[in-house]
Amino acid sequence: MCGIVAYLGKNNAIPLLIKGLKRLEYRGYDSTGIAFIDKYKKLAVIKKKGKIKNLENAIPEGLFSNIGIAHTRWATHGEPSDINAHPHTDCKGEIAVVHNGIIENFRAIRDFLVNKGHKIKTDTDTEVIAHLIEENYRGDLLEATRMALNIVEGTYGIAVISSKEPDKIIIARNGSPLAIAQNNNNYFAASDASAIIGNSESLYYMKDKEICVMSKEGLNITTLDNTPVTPEFQKIEFDLSRIEKNGFPHFMLKEIYEQPEVVMNTIRGRIDMENGDVRLNGLKNYEEWFRRDVNRIIFTACGTSWHASLIAEYLIEKLAGIPVEVEYASEFRYRNPIIDKNTAVFVVTQSGETADTLAALREAKKKGANVFGICNVVGSTIARETDAGIYVHAGPEIGVASTKAFTAQIVGALLIAVYLGRMRNLSYEEGKNIIENLLKLPAKIEGLLKEHDKIKKIAEKFKDNKNFLYLGRGFNFPIALEGALKMKEISYIHAEGYPAAEMKHGPIALIDENMPVVFIATKDSIYKKVINNIEEVKARNGNVIAIGTKGDKKLAKLANYVVYIPKTIDVLIPILTVIPLQLMAYYAAVLNGCDVDQPRNLAKSVTVE
Ligand code: F6R
């Protein structure tokens, strides 16, 4: 999704801004641009469709400026093009704005501005902000920006510079994250901490409706209605090497290989072996409420996090016996969800910034629910707005397709299921057994990752297919959905996930020798039923790729290709079965020459509705 970087200080802004933009690449983008004050104190803007390389090529060598703003754009209004790229300027080219979010009333504002004689150059919603500031400018950039923001409706994180007041940057936030850092007389702002780490040891995350002036005199933060704000800077706990590729060709592959470590990080400090239980300090303040009162749980999330929520449903119902419902956040926010004082709402999110999930969280809170997060990014908006929750500690996930965060979310959900279960009917023996097996999981994942050559060969065989069907049952049904999502989002091959038994209610019509069908057929309580479904596909000449359990010779005879996972207990199976599917999607994409880490049209964190 769109990204913002801003810098003001003693050094050359241009390379710092480009470096920041590169750190934001993982969010997904289609164009980039920078604006800075040149040596004649004039505003200069350079912007290009496509990769940051295109922008770098367009910047003349030897440019120097102490102040600038930059942007990676992910189109919402207006196609990706040089002209629609940010920064956007006013009529006279004196004010430049970069913006994340969506201005919902931009059409009305544009009509108003056109009537006033403004010349609007682009199809974007952002450009109206530059013109509104111009319209309201009476010698004070801060005041003009404040007035403009009081007119716009929607979400924004913005950074503004102007040749009229060439020594300051104005930044403001409403619903779209912005962090500020300072180091001596150098000031940074960015929509994502990764763009500014390494430059400062601490960060301030702006709150909604706050506006800040950065200048040589320091930071001046107020609310939009002019109440002074004293920023509380937090120490950045961020290991720079974790956002680099460490010798892997792609972030996605690196992140797939990090999964053994991620599982350990999610469970670290949370195991209470003596009691066959887990400790979740993040839920401590609600422990009694969970024990006595909670009789229903709603999970809400988007995309891969929604798939993890489906697994959470199976886990909590099985281990804790509490009814769980799972809702797409985008639907939840527009329904009238029934929530009472005994309903717990969990939001699951890697980024902690997904607009639909955030809106669902706010809707649930408005209805009086206690809302808990299962979140990866520490300090993100969702992490801050939930009443309590757990971090999954997957570390920064840079590849747009979520892999390690998904695994960490399932582990997080399992910990919650054991925690709730032990308060109810889950026995000490069962709790202990789950934990013991969980601790063995990282080594099993390591072993499974060694199957990469075999999985690559399967991907080679099927990479030119136009369609895939993914089928699984029980815990493996959400894995079928996730496997299909991974395949389509990075290789652009159409793939559908279904509960295996649903196949006969429609999708079976698609099966012929050209349809690869991925079955997740592990030795669990519904194994025999899945085998029957495989037989049905084989009877129609379908090509079966099976993910099975080590030692299952019958499956090898039945399927065209098999990848085996090590034996484990039922509740841990989805953490293993997803791994070959992640690798298969990865290799299919690489072999088809796709941009694995930044698939077309996709954004890492979807901060617009
Ligand atoms: C798919 C993927 C997306 C995200 C979804 C929610 O690989 O990454 O489907 O899962 O956009 O994002 P978060 O988890 O950040 O709320």
Image (cartoon, grey):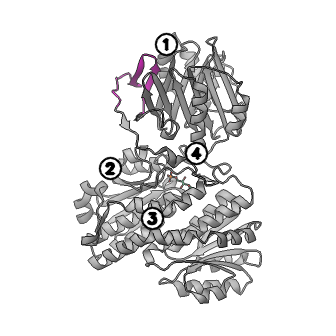
Instruction: Indicate the amino acid at tag 1.
Output: Asp
Front of the two marks 4 and 1: 4
Left or right, 217 with reference to 330: left
Residue 441: x %, y % from top left:
44, 71
The residue that appears at 47% across and 66% down in the rendered structure is: 310
Q: Foreground: 440 or 146?
A: 440
Residue 155: x %, y % from top left:
51, 36
Q: Foreground: 371 or 204?
A: 204
The residue that appears at 66% across and 51% down in the rendered structure is: 599
Label 3: which residue?
Answer: 410
Residue 557: x %, y % from top left:
66, 88
Q: Secondary structure at mark 4?
A: helix
| Vertical side of 391 occupied by 494: above or below | below
Q: Do the residues under discs 2 and 4 have CB atoms within 8 angstroms?
A: no
> Gap between marks 4 and 1, in whole Å?
34 Å
Magenta-drawn stretch contains 230: yes
Disc assigned to residue 140 = 1
Front of the two marks 3 and 2: 3
Disc assigned to residue 27 = 4
Q: Which residues are magenta?
A: 205-231
Instruction: Indicate the amino acid at tag 2.
Output: Asp
| Vertical side of 407 occupied by 425: above or below | below
Residue 188: x %, y % from top left:
49, 29
On the image, which quarter does residue 205 sit in? top left
Q: Earlier in the sequence, mark 3 or mark 1?
A: 1
Label 2: which residue?
Answer: 387
Q: Earlier in the sequence, mark 3 or mark 2?
A: 2
The residue that appears at 42% across and 25% down in the rendered structure is: 224
Magenta-drawn stretch contains 389: no
* Residue sticking out furthest to the front: 247
Crowding at dot 3, Cα within 10 Å, few <14 / some 14-19 / many 20+, comes out as many
